[in-house]
Image (cartoon, rainbow, N blue to C red):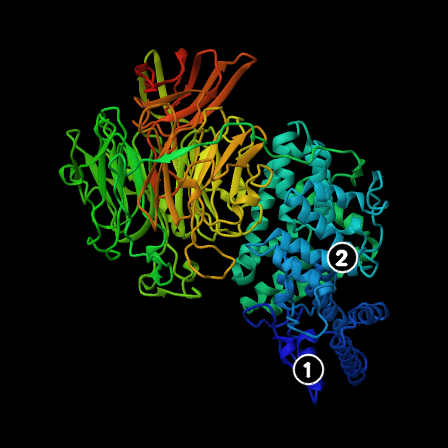
Amino acid sequence: MKLSSIRLDGTFTHQLLIVVLGFAFSSASGCGGSGTEQSSPNKQAPLAASTDKPRPQPESEPVEESRLVDTAKEFDELLRTAKFAEAESLLKNAIEQNPDDVTARRLMAQMLSAQGRRIEASHHVRHLIRLRVIQQYELLSLIDLSGPFGLVNYGEMPGMAPNTLFGLGEARRVYFSPRAEVDEVLSMLMKVRRQHPDHSTVVALTGRVLAENARWSQLQEWIAELPEDAKKVGPVAANDNSIAGVNRPMTLRDEPEFWIAIGFWLDHGGLHEEAVNAWTETLRRDPTNRAALRLIVSTTEKHLPESSRWSKELPRLRQWIGDLDKVFRLARDADAEQAAWIAERMQSWFRPWESAAWMMRVAQLTDRVAAVVPELDQRRASLLAWESQATELQAQQARLQRSMGFAPSPFEMPSLSESIAIDGTADESSRSPLVFQNVASELGINTEFSTGYPADGKEFYLHQANGVGLAALDYDLDGRCDTYFARAGGDPNKMNSLANQLYRQLPSGNFEEVTEVCRADDRGFGQGICVGDVNQDGFPDILVANIGRNSVYINQGDGTFQTDPKLINGNEERWTSSLGLADLNGDALPELVEINYIDDPLAFEVMCSPPFDNCQPQSYRVAQDYVYEMQPDGTLSPWQTVCDAMSERPKLGFGVIIGNFDDRCGNDFFVSNDGDLNHFWISKCSAGPTGGEIAGGDTELKSPAITTMIENAGLAGCAVGRSGIGEACMGIAAGDFNRDGRLDLHVTNFHKESVNLFVQTAGGFFADEALSFGLDPPSRSTTGFGTQAVDFDNDGWLDLAVLNGHLFNNISQSVPFKMLPQLFRGGERGFVSESPQASGSYFAGEQIGRTLTSLDFNNDGRLDLLANHLDQPVALLRNETPSKDSVQIEFVGKYSEKDAVGAVVTLTYNTEATAKELTSFVVSGGGYMSTGQAVVHVGLGETDGTVTLNISWPSGLNDTIEGLAVNKRYQILESSGVINATRYAR
């Protein structure tokens, strides 16, 4: 209901009473039982405690009815005349006179929620549970107390100017929308602060926005302007007010978001344990705050000693995050089983009133209300008795104890006046720029991707917009990198598209198309390309993802390919985005990972046209992914236990990366899902090594048995980014971005969304560090697709390349259609954007970029890029950046699968100043519809000329190879050492 659409007279007052009371009056009997919803899409009956006995009624129903009407009418009049402070005072007075006044409580909750004062509103909503008059949509408002939740829509009511507290509510709504503009939010908050400079929620939210977006200079000013009682050094005074006493004014220290800002400031200044304790103060006041919990986990893993209590409770904290995320996803549409699980979780977190309300919800859904009423009445009586004696601090300590396993004492506030460095990102301005030159046409690569997508981007079908794949491979093993391109242009699920193209590199360095003679001319509607050794004969095979049946082209070793339609059992018509090939079950043979997008024929029939409301992928039935297991006869069949688990988690799958993420047995893989939770499938191994014994020199090797794979993104922290909600999540790049020896992930997102930089900690938890690494602001103005993590200048730090371009043209004047590609130079303190003009004409030109991969086509020890687009031919970008030392390694498995996906190599070497160590990983999948050249490239910076390799193979074997000269490419065979070495062609 939109209040602005109702006449502000008696009719409005009557309708308002329906909303605030949860029932309508009848002329005969007073209170009826007709529920009216607001935010929830489905009407819900009030979550009353009984159906066989009435709720407690006032002694004189007509008098009470009249009083309620008078309160609502007076409140209506105050709102209508923009006397918002007086309207709030009216309700406060009513609650002081009668704490169980349902009308005042409900109206107060609605107004406070509309004003973005979510914590204050929650007190009143929780009291409605105590009174047994809670509505389902009100119960949902307690699931997350950070984001906006409109219990009613006040619409365009007169007087709701941006400088009123309703402007605070709008600022909160904008900030927590998927594509918030930080400067816009800060401007909105500034308007409210001019009118309400000391309002605790306005000040606290301002601090949070500044802190979460690394506005360190402005945050320093914010701290300087805080009142002295807010930043007083010493123990944070416990609030010993009774739990029921919710009418006292909120102070800054009562605000959970105040402590989020303080924690960021302390963490940025190196006071990591103090920051963790500050964020705990957030959870003490708001146990729904997943952002604070994620900060606690990531900071603990990065900075606190293993002996700390926080470190010891990390598994429990991760489980808490995963469960809170799950509740957030399920609550709105929860069925009886899910509602029962939510009730159990709420009870375990010592949120008993919410647990009771969810139990009643279960009873409603299962028609068992009468059966559960006695238990709920007994629980209610016990809770009320306990609350009458308890303090707010005791309740907070109980929640922390139940949720975290321990309850820290209230925080000791350190001095906030210490000056700290306010620039946390890299400064690489003195270095030579990263420079690239497009030489595709010059060297004979002349291909353009025709998917049917129009040049103006205004009328098209959804399947034409995602781009098509490409790959870099040495298919004839002559030491020169070749290229393969998917194409489209025909119809989905038919073999009538343009033929895919294979370009062979000649000794001259030019490329020649050899598609027909090589017989790799797939004609499906092409999507991703994967390269790997399917039959383990040493020659790379080509796997083509189509909208339709996927194809596998087996390399015959004589320069030709042969396809076998029976190779993949269960290879049906699907919209497959990406493929990955790697050993997943530990048998030294490859499995095939198939990432699918939409499973709905309607998607091929609906024309996308401005304003593109009819063209959202989420409006179609989403597809499940599949893993195919290699069989003894060389065919691939669905790995049933894994596929069964995947069938319960269909998503809009885009990209995949396979590798050994957790340094445990078996490979794992990460899947980027469009607009939803990402997936992270980890191998589940038996307790000890099993299986056949394999001789490895003088060593007898027993490989661990991998029984299945489990989805673990929620617990691992990479299901969602820092925003806490699903984002576009398209391209993926993997590498060790902070040089701590662990595999991290860079994930591109939609316009106005930051990229995700999932940095892995020692405990295997991922924290989204896009902001602290300098990637958040420059990525919000783009829609990113393909991305690669490459050390372009060989300084020892991974850099990033990203292709950008929107799906839709003319959404609004402020949203660009064609976009610049981006280069980010990596360094010890994060990333900085490269100047487009300094990096060459390609990076200075706008485009509709899509897939991207890396290669060293000219063997000069500098990685190049291969890029495709919807609006221009493919680009082969030769790296012309001044370079330092590096090595390149081709891994060949002997007891492991031939491509050795999952191998980890640690390189140690000396510089003039110190010894250094770098770690690199063999991965498969390519991120977004692409596959790069099968070499591990490691930039070293300046060295003394040699390097030592320590290799951990997927089989469990380890090799150490010492004294290798830098600036060479090495081919290394498992347990046999170097079998070939080639100096760079410089």
Q: Position of residue 382 (x, y in %)?
A: 75, 58
Q: Residues within 10 Å of mark 2 (few under 14, many from 20)?
A: many
Amino acid found under the numbered disc labelled 2: Arg
User: Which residue is found at the position 71% from the left and 86% from the top?
Assistant: 10
Q: Position of residue 419 (x, y in %)?
A: 76, 33
- Residue at the disc numbered 1: 12
Nearer the observer, 551 or 144: 551
Instruction: Estimate the spatial distance between the alpha carbons at disc 2 and disc 1, rounded to whole Å.
Output: 32 Å
Horizontal placement of 95 versus 451: left or right? Answer: right
Q: Nearer the viewer, mark 2 or mark 1?
A: 2
* Callouts 2 and 1 close, C-beta under 8 Å: no
Amino acid found under the numbered disc labelled 1: Phe
Q: Position of residue 407 (x, y in %)?
A: 73, 40
* Up-down relation of residue 566 to residue 370 (above or below): above
Residue 193 numbered mark, or none: 2
Horizontal placement of 563 versus 574: left or right? Answer: left
Q: Residues within 10 Å of mark 1 (few under 14, many from 20)?
A: some
Q: Quadrant of residue 164?
A: bottom right
